[in-house]
Image: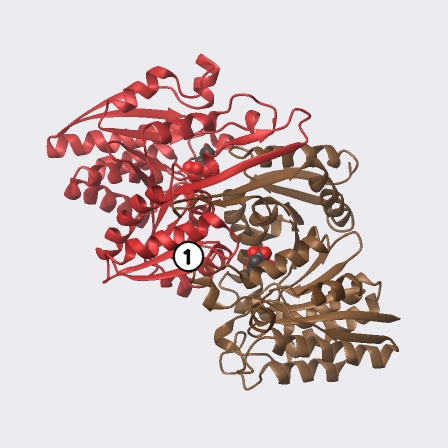
Chain colours: A red, B brown
């Protein structure tokens, strides 16, 4: 297979972890005779520094015209604590999601056997947990109208959803549930929010086409508790943009490190793959960031193109790295291995 | 002291747990010579059933004219799964919060020594954790304009905040931090939401009057993770309404049971005390609900009126109940004690 892949390393540790994902893909390409052509482009704080724009036109065009996007991380503290900044790195990512129509963000949560003790949760709580979060990614308060009055004393964010936006991701989530343990949990705040009530209504309707999937509902406050109390109860979780952002970061604790989780963002035509962790600026350039999430996002990319054997080879290589404790300090405080060594190990095993 | 207390038992297990809180207050009144006069009123699904209104005029008037409100729980599944219901129990609680101006909801999180093993988190993670969440309670998406178009295919919720709304709760939170370990963590999503950026700006400004308090900021997705990874890092958490709803339910896992957490909701003139758990309809009438959160909310009421010794007596009585394992099944699956027995034990110890 020939794939043209746009690579956006982004900020902080992004470039370091993306380099390891590329290594893994090169190794796969050699063994399985695929040609992956990478083209790098700027996005995020680094793009602002160099061009003034967090998503330069050129980057967007590249992404629109490639088979897939591999993305590192975004964000820089110099923007976070400046509420008056006019341009922010995150705008680049949000615009890219919107322009590529990446409405479904898929985040699988499953602890590694060899790592159950790395979690702050007790072994018996997490052993056997295995669920996937479907987060809507191009709607809600992320993209609704924002206001700030002239005096800077009053602000607002509008959360909006349409039936169509809910329907398309609901179908994906139900289909995924059909291929798994046939349970879908819709998370919302329907006792308070109008948009949540629309979600509930539409998801109930879509659910009629999937009679073999058990559909239930949880309020988001309760869900935030249940994910920790009893993560095994979940199979597929479906939720809106902001709730999905919160719950998936929270759920990362089940695996012991957010450095282990990747996500796929899918649209009608485009697809983007990224670790769920952020840019972790304190670790930048230190060769200590965990590259596994980034390498996993490369594996999700392969799956997306039907290369299941190849993806599996990566999953196995990562399991081996974990088993042999070739991991970064987030997983083993006294580890001697850095970002680069873990990446080398994985691509050598491939 | 003479206190007139409005009692709103509400739905589900509300009446059962409230009865135990009243018992504790009666016992305190006898020992310390206070007169607590209780007046009951309807709110929630039960008020809809009896009057068509989740917050009848009479209830509101009573609450406006008492020293404090003791509240049980609200909610009924028959409304939750009906996205078309015109009247909902929760509207009663939200209206009451708004009419009484209860802008600050305060939720202390601290595990009981005797219960550290009841938590899904490992002992070393939670031992020593002790923080308080200040949740804004009368603003944000809970109270902003809601729309649903005529075809029922498009919905919106508006999240709004003003400088004034943020300032008043920020002062309370900073003052609390001054009396604690002098750290305040503001939780928001300032990399995406305009309201969050306003929060950040205003809280920074208010913070200048509290130079002895260390102020830091976390994005809500990261906060949802940090509360589980390392709850000991927190002292006072300050956040907006919906984030506070999610994070405080999540944080309840630290204590092992949501049946152990109470909250105070404060305004300029009024105050309301309630367990943070919901109406738990499956347990209604079974004498299995944990009354401790409700009894604790009575203790928070006493503290609010400066009766610290009395509140402490309740805290000690609850600790004793836990120590002697006179607890409900959520804390000890084979327990023979019910709601009523735990309540009796506590009031007898007083
Ligand atoms: C960086 C930020 C805008 C982003 C989000 O909130 O979506 C991140 O937290 C994520 O989850 O991908
Ligand atoms: C019942 C519901 C409206 C309420 C809320 O969301 O505020 C509850 O969850 C709470 O936290 O008190």
Mark 1 lies within 8 Å of ligand 1 (Cβ measured): no
Residue A76 locus on image (x, y percent)? 51, 27
Judge whether A268 appears above or below B90 on screen: above
Q: Determine the secondary structure under disc 1.
A: helix
Residue drawn at (43%, 57%) of the image = B83
Q: Residue at x 54, y 36 (%)?
A: A157
- Labels in figure, total: 1
In the shown orientation, is residue B28 left or right of residue B44? right
Closer to us: B110 or B310:
B310
User: Horizontally, is A277 left or right of B45 in the view?
Assistant: left
In the displayed structure image, the side of residue A231 where residue A68 appears, left or right? left
Quarter holding the C terminus of chain A? top left
Q: Nearer the viewer, residue A150 or B191?
A: A150
Callout 1: few (<14), some (14-19), or many (20+) C-alpha neighbours within 10 Å?
some
Residue A229, given in percent of the width and then of the height, sits at: 46, 63
Dividing the picture into quarters, in which one does residue A263 lie? Answer: top left
- Please identify the quarter of the rendering in which residue A123 is found: bottom left
Where residue B286 appears, x then y in whole percent? 52, 83
In this orientation, does residue A113 appear? no
Residue A328 vs residue B341: left or right? Answer: left
Q: Which residue is mark 1?
A: A117
Q: Relative to A57, is A339 above or below?
A: below
Q: Looking at the image, which residue is at 53% across and 43% down?
A: B220
Marked residue chain, label 1: A
As drawn, which residue projects farthest toward the front? B150
* Residue A271 drawn above or below residue B253: above
Q: Residue at x 54, y 45 (%)?
A: B223
Q: Quadrant of ligand 1?
A: top left
Q: Give the quadrant of the N terminus of chain A.
A: top left
């Amino acid at each position: 297979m020939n794939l043209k892949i746009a690579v956006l390393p982004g900020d902080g540790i992004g470039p370091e972890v993306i380099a390891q994902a590329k290594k893994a893909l090169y190794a796969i390409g050699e063994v399985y005779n695929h040609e992956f052509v990478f083209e790098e482009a700027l996005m995020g704080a680094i793009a602002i520094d160099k061009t003034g724009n967090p998503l330069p036109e050129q980057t967007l065009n590249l992404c629109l015209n490639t088979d897939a996007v591999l993305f590192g991380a975004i964000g820089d503290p110099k923007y976070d604590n400046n509420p008056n900044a006019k341009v922010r790195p995150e705008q680049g990512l949000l615009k890219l999601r919107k322009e590529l129509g990446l409405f479904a963000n898929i985040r699988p949560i499953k602890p590694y056997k060899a790592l159950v003790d790395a979690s702050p949760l007790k072994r018996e709580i997490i052993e056997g947990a295995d669920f996937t979060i479907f987060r809507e990614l191009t709607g809600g308060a992320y993209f609704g109208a924002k206001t700030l009055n002239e005096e800077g004393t009053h602000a607002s964010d509008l959360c909006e959803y349409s039936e169509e936006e809910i329907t398309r991701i609901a179908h994906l989530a139900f289909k995924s549930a059909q291929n798994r343990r046939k349970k879908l949990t819709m998370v919302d705040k329907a006792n308070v929010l109008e948009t949540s009530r629309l979600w509930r209504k539409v998801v109930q309707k879509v659910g009629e086409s999937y009679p073999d999937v058990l559909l239930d509902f949880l309020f988001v406050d309760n869900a935030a508790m249940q994910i920790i109390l009893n993560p095994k109860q979940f199979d597929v979780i479906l939720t809106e943009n902001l709730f999905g952002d919160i719950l998936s970061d929270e759920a990362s604790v089940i695996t012991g490190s957010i450095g282990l989780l990747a996500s796929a963002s899918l649209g009608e035509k485009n697809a983007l793959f990224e670790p769920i962790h952020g840019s972790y600026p304190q670790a930048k350039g230190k060769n200590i960031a965990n590259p596994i999430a980034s390498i996993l996002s490369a594996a999700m990319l392969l799956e997306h193109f039907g290369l299941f054997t190849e993806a599996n080879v990566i999953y196995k290589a990562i399991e081996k790295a974990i088993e042999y404790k070739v991991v970064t300090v987030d997983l083993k405080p006294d580890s001697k291995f850095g970002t680069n060594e873990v990446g080398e190990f994985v691509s050598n095993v491939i």
